[in-house]
Image (spheres, grey):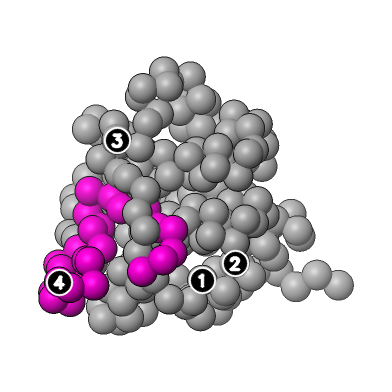
Amino acid sequence: MTREIELADLACLLGSHAEIQAYDSSTADETRDHEITDLVTKAETTDQLAALTAMIEPGQHSTILDTYAQRAAALAVQRQDPNLLRLGLLALAVAYVKTRDFRDNLVTLALLWRSAELLALDPREELERTATRVPPAADFFHGWINRSPDAQALSTMGCREANVRGEFWYETPWRRYRPATQPRETEQRASESFFSRLRRGRRRGPGQDA
């Protein structure tokens, strides 16, 4: 018998300020990545995506899911893993439904779109599949699909591909990785922007324009 998703399963979407800050800026293999992967996989394979979405709280839950989706975009390219990309898209869809500021989700979607291209997948097909699985996010995904190629470009969203100590990652407007010769404060300042986004999300609703 399939166990229903419970609030206890959402523990991976919580944490102290320091823990979440470290997760946002980390380039390591994080335990939290595996826990969220398991959560989203369970929701998908047991037809509980709607139940998971209903349990997600705007703010910390949705922001950490969005951060996971960004990490999944990069890790999918590192590992050449299309399934991880698809889990990232599902996490983003759930996060979007409960977001307080959809503009951060647009940045994440740009990364996932680019990763699909790098994995030689059809990005349109991948987004269409996700929209079918999480219908409340369908308009968000279709809106992106209908953008011009220039509007879908990483540079348009202030992002770029980066080689971080030999590994593929994405830099975003709030995350810049330091060269090996620069002080660690560079990464710390970047990760602090995560909490600026979290605080800003509590003040701005998802229906407000950029």
Question: In 3D space, how far apart are the residues under numbered discs 4 and 2 (Cα atoms)?
Answer: 32 Å
Residue 37 left/right relative to 63: right
Dot 4: what SS? loop
Q: Nearer the viewer, mark 3 or mark 4?
A: 4
Question: In 3D space, how far apart are the residues under numbered discs 1 and 4 (Cα atoms)?
Answer: 27 Å
Instruction: Give, as a three-letter code, the residue at label 1.
Output: Asp
Question: What residue is shown with label 1?
Answer: 33
Q: Earlier in the sequence, mark 4 or mark 2?
A: 2
Q: Nearer the viewer, mark 1 or mark 4?
A: 4
Contact, mark 2 vs mark 1 (Cβ under 8 Å): yes
Q: Earlier in the sequence, mark 3 or mark 2?
A: 2
Query: Which residue does the image show at 28% across and 73% down from the upper left?
Result: 21
Instruction: Give, as a three-letter code, the residue at label 2.
Output: Thr
Contact, mark 1 vs mark 3 (Cβ under 8 Å): no
Dot 1: what SS? helix
Instruction: Give, as a three-letter code, the residue at label 4.
Output: Gln
Pick the front one: 24 or 132:
24
The quadrant of the picture occupied by the C terminus is top left
Question: In 3D space, how far apart are the residues under numbered discs 1 and 3 (Cα atoms)?
Answer: 26 Å
Residue 17 appears at what percent x and percent y?
25, 78
Q: Residue 182: which disc? A: 4
Q: Earlier in the sequence, mark 1 or mark 3?
A: 1
Q: Residue 155: which disc? A: 3
Question: What residue is shown with label 2?
Answer: 37
Contact, mark 3 vs mark 4 (Cβ under 8 Å): no
Residue 30 left/right relative to 131: left
Question: In 3D space, how far apart are the residues under numbered discs 3 and 4 (Cα atoms)?
Answer: 24 Å
Contact, mark 3 vs mark 2 (Cβ under 8 Å): no
Res 66 quadrant in image: bottom left
Dot 3: what SS? helix
